[in-house]
Image (cartoon, rainbow, N blue to C red):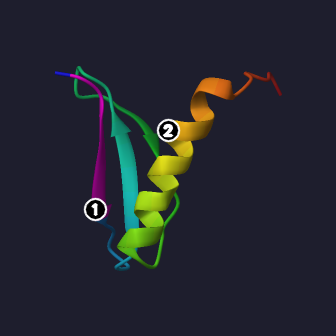
Amino acid sequence: MAAKFEVYKDKKGDFRFRLVAANGQVIATSQGYKSKASCLKGIESVKKNAPKTDVVEV
């Protein structure tokens, strides 16, 4: 099984996504989005930008 994005509604009714690793562990969660379309755009942004992202220690 590969990693996957799961889309769900939270208790307030907002859409969120989580990135789940192949072993089933949640490795990232999103902010809340008012629409499913916006949530899906958030996933696409992560897919597009993550490979280019620097790691910064703060």
Which region is colored magenta? 2-8
Q: Nearer the viewer, residue 54 or 47?
A: 47
Q: Going by the image, does 55 lie left or right of 9?
A: right
Q: Is residue 16 magenta?
A: no
Q: Nearer the viewer, mark 2 or mark 1?
A: 2
Q: Who comes first in sequence, dot 2 or dot 1?
A: 1
Q: Going by the image, does 56 lie left or right of 23?
A: right
Q: Residue drawn at (40%, 70%), measured in percent from left and top?
A: 37
Q: Is residue 7 magenta?
A: yes
Q: Residue drawn at (34%, 79%), measured in percent from left and top?
A: 13
Q: Residue furthest left?
A: 1
The image shows residue 35 at horizontal and vertical percentages of: 41, 77
Q: Nearer the viewer, residue 49 or 25?
A: 49
Q: Local crowd at mark 2 within 10 Å, few (<14), some, or many (≥20)?
A: few
Query: Tag 1: residue type?
Result: Tyr
Say which element carries label 2.
helix
Query: Tag 2: residue type?
Result: Lys
Q: Residue furthest right?
A: 58
User: Vertical placement of 18 versus 49: above or below?
Assistant: below
The image shows residue 15 at horizontal and vertical percentages of: 38, 69
Q: Where is mark 1, residue-wise?
A: 8
User: Vertical placement of 43 versus 20: above or below?
Assistant: below
The mark total stands at 2
Residue 1 figure quarter:
top left
